[in-house]
Image (cartoon, rainbow, N blue to C red):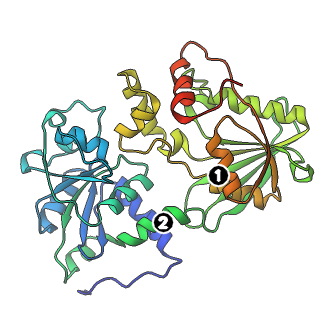
């Protein structure tokens, strides 16, 4: 048994290990974050009794709950300092339970623990890396953490605990699209756009796949219509009235067919990057009076967690360098331009409210700056 620190992984292996670590958090398995202060972390959302027992047994400190600032203010029942990136709260043994942790992690939960105020604790150095890893796993950004004494790691190795450098996790989002490549392509005739193809892309070491829907031959057009569309299971597939995503998806394909060519980039970034389950939680909070932006923040996420670099890289691979962007979102215009794609024009893409999504559209205009009045 090796009692020394694990061998440092090569740069090429780091993304693979990060995804394995995020997967372990999703399964309720602890992960070790290495650095000046080694930290053993566990997802507050997915942990079970065995995970809680492991952090109790292996930790050398009292367990703390690390959450995003907005959630921290609710957990501590007091304001959180502006500019804080994370907040730590001391967990009494009586509340270090499955239901207790989920009650603190999830603002939509109604467990008794969620109504108990915690005491603040010093923020561990690797706190931000811990929340970043939870987000990569599309989990609520809420983790239980204990410090680990430097030195022998045989107990952790015997338990199969993955270790990752906190610095590598923090650096990962900037390189999340590294190695993006075309995986498969096939003709897929669509209603109203029979001359269509679907091209699938995947980033290195990631199981996440993004799609490009090509209508006609946009590669030969001087500046084809392009739509960056984040997947929306509820709107695109179910026809949900809570958003305008389904109308935007089908409307974009129709406009491209009428124009003769176009590309719809279908990105695996559900709920502005927070994932489907968290989006459903956000809906619950919206039903309690929050708008879509504040609901995301209360869950511990940013207002918009998407990465549009992947869209630019897909266009480059397709040989498209100049576009007319079909969007109401100024952030998409700026993101493509920043990534070297020339946006020669913007085509408005707004749809009338339906009586259910009125406030959603108002929030997009008022708080996200979407151009819906043109």
Q: Locate the N terminus by quadrant.
A: bottom left
Residue hosting label 2: 172
Tell whether 84 sits left or right of 316.
Answer: left
Q: Are marks 2 and 1 in contact (CB under 8 Å)?
A: no
Front residue of this view, candidates 353 and 185: 353
Q: Residue furthest top?
A: 355
Tell whether 246 sits left or right of 276.
Answer: right
Measured along the vertical axis of the image, is residue 32 above or below residue 141? below
Q: Position of residue 40 (x, y in %)?
A: 24, 65
Mark 2 Cα shell of 10 Å, populated few (<14), some (14-19), many (≥20): some
Measured along the vertical axis of the image, is residue 347 above or below residue 173? above
Determine the residue positioned at 50% across, 47% down. 305
Numbered label tally: 2
Front residue of this view, candidates 80 and 223: 80
SS at circle 1:
helix
Q: Position of residue 183 (x, y in %)?
A: 71, 60
SS at circle 2:
helix
Q: CA distance from mark 2 to mark 1?
A: 19 Å
Determine the residue positioned at 37% across, 85% down. 7
Q: Position of residue 225 (x, y in %)?
A: 82, 41
Q: Locate the C terminus by quadrant.
A: top right
Front residue of this view, candidates 337 and 247: 337
Front position among marks 2 and 1: 1
Q: Is residue 103 visible?
A: no
Residue hosting label 1: 335
Q: Position of residue 21 (x, y in %)?
A: 39, 64
């Amino acid at each position: 048994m090796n009692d020394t620190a694990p061998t440092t992984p090569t740069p090429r292996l780091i993304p693979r290990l990060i995804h394995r670590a995020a997967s372990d958090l999703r399964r309720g398995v602890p992960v070790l974050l290495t650095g000046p202060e080694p930290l053993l972390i566990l997802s507050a959302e997915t942990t079970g009794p065995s995970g809680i027992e492991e952090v109790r047994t292996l930790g050398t400190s009292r367990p703390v709950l690390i959450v995003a600032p907005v959630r921290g203010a609710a957990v501590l029942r007091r304001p959180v300092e502006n500019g804080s990136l994370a907040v730590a709260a001391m967990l009494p043994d009586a509340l270090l339970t499955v239901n207790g942790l989920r009650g603190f992690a999830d603002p939509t939960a109604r467990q008794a623990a969620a109504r108990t105020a915690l005491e603040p604790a010093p923020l561990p150095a690797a706190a931000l890396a811990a929340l970043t890893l939870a987000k990569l796993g599309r989990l609520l950004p809420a983790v239980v953490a204990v410090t680990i004494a430097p030195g022998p790691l045989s107990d952790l190795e015997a338990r199969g605990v993955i270790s990752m450098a906190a610095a590598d996790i923090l650096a990962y989002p900037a390189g999340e699209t590294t190695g993006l490549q075309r995986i498969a392509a096939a003709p897929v005739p669509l209603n109203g756009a029979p001359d269509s193809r679907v091209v699938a892309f995947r980033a290195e070491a990631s199981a996440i796949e993004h799609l490009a829907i090509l209508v006609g031959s946009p590669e030969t057009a001087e500046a084809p219509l392009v739509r960056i569309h984040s997947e929306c299971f509820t709107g695109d597939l179910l026809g949900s009235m809570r958003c305008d995503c389904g109308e935007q998806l089908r409307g974009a394909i129709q406009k491209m067919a009428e124009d003769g060519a176009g590309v719809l980039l279908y990105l695996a970034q559900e709920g502005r990057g927070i994932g489907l389950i968290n989006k459903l939680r956000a809906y619950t909070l919206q039903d309690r009076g929050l708008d879509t932006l504040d609901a995301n923040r209360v869950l511990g996420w940013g207002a918009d967690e998407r990465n549009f670099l992947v869209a630019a890289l897909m266009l480059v691979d397709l040989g498209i360098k100049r576009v007319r962007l079909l969007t109401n979102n100024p952030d998409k215009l700026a993101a493509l331009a920043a990534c070297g794609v020339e946006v020669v024009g913007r085509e408005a893409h707004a749809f009338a409210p339906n009586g259910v999504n009125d406030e959603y559209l108002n929030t997009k205009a008022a708080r996200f700056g979407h151009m819906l009045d043109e």
